[in-house]
Amino acid sequence: MALFGGEAWANPVANQMNMTKGVSEWSPYAMHMVALWVCVVIGVLVFGAMFIAMFRFRKSRGAVAEKWAHSTKLEVVWTVVPVIILIFLANLATGGLTTFADTTGADMTIKVTGYQWKWRYDYVDYKGKGVDKVGFVSKLEESSDRTRQLKSNLDPEKIQVEGYNTYLLDVDKPLVVPVGVKIRFIIVGGDVIHSWWVPALGWKMDAIPGIANAAWTNIKEPGVYRGQCAELCGQDHGFMPIVVKAVPKAEFEQWLATQEDEAKIQKAAQTAQNAPAPAPQG
Amino acid sequence: MAHAATHDHDDHHGAPKGFFQRWVMSTNHKDIGTLYLIFSLTMFFIGGAFAMVIRAELFKPGMQLVQPYFFNEMTTMHALVMIFGAIMPAFVGLANWMVPLMVGAPDMALPRMNNLSFWILPFAFFMLLSTLFMPGGGPAGGWTMYPPLSLQGESVAYVIFAIHLMGISSIMGAINIIATILNMRAPGMDLLKMPVFVWSWLITAFLLIAVMPVLAGAVTMLLTDKYFHTNFFNAAGGGDPVLFQHIFWFFGHPEVYIMILPAFGIISEIIPTFARKPIFGYRAMVFAIASIAFLSFIVWAHHMFAVGLPMGAEIFFMYATMLIAVPTGVKVFNWVSTMWGGSMTFETPMLFSIAFVILFTIGGFSGLMLALAPADFQYHDTYFVVAHFHYVLVTGAAFSIMAAAYYWIPKWSGHMYSETWGKIHFWSSVISVNVLFFPQHFLGLAGMPRRIPDYNVAFANFNMISSIGGFWFGASQLIFLGVIIHCVFFSKKKAADRSWEGAKGLEWTVPSPAPFHTFDVPPVIHDDELAHGNTDH
Ligand code: HEM
Ligand SMILES: [Cu+2]
Ligand SMILES: [Cu+2]
């Protein structure tokens, strides 16, 4: 049973109650916990006072109402103390924002495009070199897609990868990325607005037509990280998951090379096909 | 003619006899208030039915009941009906009934406009709801109507026309309330002697007038983008989809405060009554409402932290949003201090008010967390947000309306409701609503996006708990309906003029039920009869 504060779940687990710590260099987890505890402490004090009042000052216990209805001292206290707490929180959050907003110094760029209802990934550059035509579409994997049809009578529990239930959280072709590399994402929308969200990376960013948004990650541990579209984008909004497969650098470089080769072969095949220009038809 | 124009309703007699004359042609603030309240209750059940469809589909993983597109229609309609049909008209209904009674006015300042602003609503909602039966279906792009998605719908024109009507109705209602409060107070009812509820509505009415036209502008631009080839929000034509979000939330954030400020007012009436002690810090309470209203205009982009705003904008909107926690905190602390040292009893209105203070504050806490932009990159558009706004809207706004109904129904009907059944309604509601919404915090934090019809099995248990809470909460509201019907038509227990021992204010000086016409002659104000007459403290 997963309770508050415990282990770092990278992907949702049954009965999970708290935010993932994430696997990237940047994570709002600590700030979330600070804010949560601030709220819990204030809550205990305020609700505690209320319950004491409700117990002590009941008419049935013979309480007689007092007449006072004002206290400048108290009112100053409960204006000033929250302000101080807020300044503390604001300071923390400003720090988090500043590091998040800094997408400079990335070693790799990936372009993410949201479509109804799939994602497209294009590898733009890696280690300062342009990547040649590596890009693909990534969409809900087929067994989830069959199961999620209305009254399919198929059991979502059955969809598993290595003992982990991947119903609606798996794709046909994951985004492969290296660990330990600062990756810059350029995120755009192809038709309507979507939002690219992998909780383990710590953020989501809207994919908006006509706007190129930027965000970054630097994944520390190899693994498979799952997420979903987070902005309502039409009927199959719930069915366009995201899977990021983070692998060691060497493995990634190999993968990228194969992809580039494949892209070349495909391109050659295409040009070969197109070469004997069809006879003019009219 | 001149006579007819100035004196066509019977000022000094009872209600008109004919049903049509009395209800459709009404210019009486009490009858119109009743109409608003009945309308709101009807919409509450219609919107609630949509919510039941949503929770039934989400009961377990896999698609069992409806197609995804219909699911989106349900989430969209649920929000539109609840916001514009249930919560807002309920508050306007309460204002209609109570503001004239509380300030010693014979009626609203503009009685015919009052009639019009109510009777627009049934048509608006008939049109909105009828889209569900049309070939292309109803709106399915969310109540926020973000383009380009919302423009893919077939029902855009109907929905926008309906929203225009609701906006006109709200603006007219707001003008009426402002005119009544500023011009119709009995001599001696100074502004700073007015009940907090009246203050809260005065400020809310200004918010309404300020932002409903903004909404109207935004949806009109949607309309022309869809049908007249403009490109306000179309990136391919040089427009900007994010512009819509700025305009929408410039309306939208004040709108959420439109739905909570009158609630603050109600709670500030009820707690002093049942604590038998004047409200703590009356001026601070009024000032807090005013400053929340002001701040609500400069925080809108906290709904847009994930659209990729420049960092400076994120920081500004984050700080401004956090600032709202200060006056909000003042209100909560003052309610608690009002209870402290009182002599409390716990009738149903008080129970709902206490639940309001605790549960609204929980919603405020999650609001504060959401205000932290970096953390919102995780929270945004998840069930955590859904939990937040249901805590402030259901256990906040809706609970305050229920509290108000129990508090004032003796004055409206002349009978006492059944305290036993009121309490059953309260406990059933307050437990089920937490079963319904508290687990949604966990779902959001664990990674479940909002507005999805199906989900991974990791989210199964909390969804099932939430759905059970949902059906239970829905069923509990049938008790509410029963209590109201019983109270109005069957209750034998006559209500005293001052229905509650500790109640102060002008509304309790008139008979119960309040006669058709009250304060034809302005009442003489005795400060010690007012809840807030002694403002020297
Ligand atoms: C302490 C005061 C509050 C703060 C700091 C606050 C903050 C926020 C923030 C930052 C969001 C955006 C979350 C996101 O989409 O990621 C939000 C959403 C929302 N809040 Fe609040 N809030 C507060 C009180 C209220 C109140 C009083 C209401 C209404 C009665 C309210 C209703 C809503 C609604 C309806 C949404 C969601 C709108 C949507 O996306 O559909 N909030 N709030
Ligand atoms: Cu989506
Ligand atoms: Cu807001």
Image (cartoon, coloured by chain):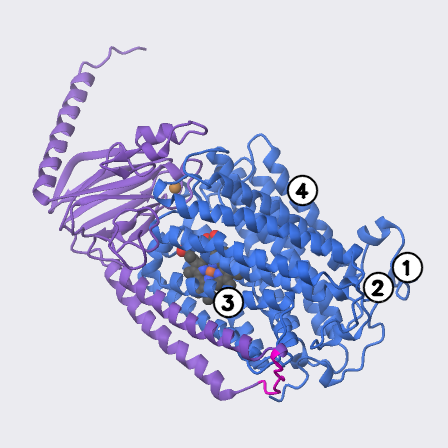
Q: What whole-number distance in Å separates the C-alpha atoms at marks 3 and 4?
A: 36 Å
Helix, strand, or loop for circle 2?
loop
Helix, strand, or loop for circle 1?
helix
Q: What whole-number distance in Å separates the C-alpha atoms at marks 3 and 2?
A: 37 Å
Coordinates of residue B174 in the picture (x, y in percent):
66, 62
Rendered-image quadrant of the C terminus of chain B = bottom right
Q: In the drawing, what numbered circle is on residue B516?
A: 2
Whether label 3 touches label 2, CB < 8 Å: no
Q: Amino acid at mark 2?
A: Phe
Are labels 3 and 2 assigned to the same chain? yes
Q: What whole-number distance in Å separates the C-alpha atoms at marks 4 and 1?
A: 33 Å
Q: Amino acid at mark 1?
A: Ala
Whether label 4 touches label 1, CB < 8 Å: no
* Residue that mark 3 sits on: B358
Residue at image position (85%, 72%) is B520
**Chain B, hue in figure:** blue
Of marks 3 and 4, which one's residue comes earlier in the chain? Answer: 4
Of marks 3 and 1, which one's residue comes earlier in the chain? Answer: 1
Q: In the drawing, what numbered circle is on residue B4?
A: 1
Coordinates of residue B369 in the picture (x, y in percent):
38, 63
